[in-house]
Image: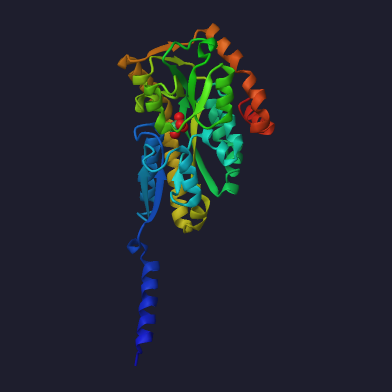
Amino acid sequence: MLTRRMIARLAGASFLALSIAAPAFAEPIVIKFSHVVAPETPKGKGAAKFEELAEKYTNGAVDVEIYPNSQLYKDKEELEALQLGAVQMLAPSLAKFGPLGVQDFEVFDLPYMFPDYEALHKVTQGEVGKMLLDKLQDKGITGLAYWDNGFKIMSANSPINMPDDFLGLKMRIQSSKVLEAQMNALGAVPQVMAFSEVYQALQTGVVDGAENPPSNMLTQKINEVQKYATVSNHGYLGYAVIVNKKFWDDLPDEVRAGLEKAMVEATDYANGIAKEENDKALETMKAAGTTEFHDLSSEELAAWKEALAPVQDEMADRIGPETIAAVKAATGQ
Ligand code: LMR
C-alpha cells in the first residue's frame, strides 16, 4: 500500500520528470534588455531583431523584454542594475564603461581615431575587440557583441564651424574622460549628463550644445532645440552588448547556444543598418529646417584635427598605451 508520504514523493518525481522532458511547459526564462534610446534607432532596431531571433532559436524557452528610452534605468543606473541582476542585458555606449573601471573602452572616444566604419570594424570585429570585451569579466559582465551607431556631429545654439567657436560653451558629454578632454581641448566646458536629460537641458539652457550621431539627435528631437550643427564626424559612438555573467553562465547550454546564434545575426543586422539610418536621420533633420547644418571645409577640418590632436597623448595613460597601440595596429595607423 502506498503511504501518503510515498504518494507525495512520487508526485514530486513525476513532476520533475515532466518538467525536464517537456521544457515547453516551463516558464520562459526572462531576459530584460534595458536601453536608453528610442526603438527606431540602430540600437533599438537591433534589440528588436535580437528579441525576435532569440525567441525563435530557443523555441520560446526565452522571453526577451525590451525597455527602451531609459524607461527602467538611466545611463549609470543601468550598469549597476545589470551587475545586481535586476536586468540581464544592456547595450551601453562604449563611452560609458569608464565609471565601471574599464577605461580602455574610451579608446573609441578618441577624436578622429577611426576614419570610417570599415576601420572601426577591424577593431570591433577582430581580436582587439574581443580582448576589450574580456576585460568586463572581472566586473561580473560578459560582452557578447559590438553594435554600431555612427559618427558624431556637434550641435549648439551658435555656429560652431571652427574650434574657437566652442570657447566657453557648455557641452553635454557622456561619462568619458576622453570626451571631457576633447571638449576641454576645444575650450568648451564639458558637462556629464544622462542621455534622457539632454533634450530638457538644451531647451532650458542648462547646456548650450551636445554631440551625437544623427539618429540619436533626431529621435530625441534635439534638432528642435539646437540652431546649429556641424557635421564634423569627429568621433564614433557605438555599443557593447553585455549580459550579467552569472545569468549567462547559468543558462542551459542549448539555450545559450540559441541566444548566441541570435546575437550573431542581430549584430549583422544592426551593423548593416546603422550607416543608412544615420544618413537618413541627417537628411530628415536637414529637411525639417530647425537646425542649420554645416559641413567642414578642408581648412576647418584641419583646424579641428589640430585642436583635438593633443587629446590622444593626454589620455594615453588612462586608456592604456598598449590598447591605443593595438587599435592603431589593427587599423593600420
Ligand atoms: C548618449 O548618452 O549620448 C548615447 O550613449 C546614447 C546611446 O545609447 O546611444
Q: Is residue 317 visible?
A: yes
Image x and y of residue 302, in percent: 57, 10
Tell which of 262 and 299 is nearer to you.
299
- Say which residue appears at 36% left-offset and 73% top-offset: 15
| Residue 333 visible within the image | no
Q: Position of residue 178 (x, y in %)?
A: 58, 27
Q: Quadrant of the C terminus?
A: top right
- The answer to whether 315 is drawn above or below residue 262 in the figure is above
State the residue at coordinates (45%, 49%): 88
Q: Position of residue 102 (x, y in %)?
A: 59, 39
Q: Specify the quadrant of the image occupied by residue 268.
A: top left
Toward the viewer: 74 or 148? 74
Quadrant of the rendered image holding ligand 1: top left
How many labels, in total? 0
Image quarter for residue 101?
top right
Residue 87 place in picture, x, y as percent: 43, 49
Which quadrant does the N terminus fall into? bottom left
Quarter of image, res 45 = top left
Task: Determine whether 275 is above or below 307 in the image.
Answer: below
Q: Quick one: which residue is furthest to the bottom in this view? A: 1
Indicate how the structure is coloured in the image: rainbow
Residue at 37%, 22% (x, y): give it.
203
**Looking at the image, which residue sits at the far left?**
288
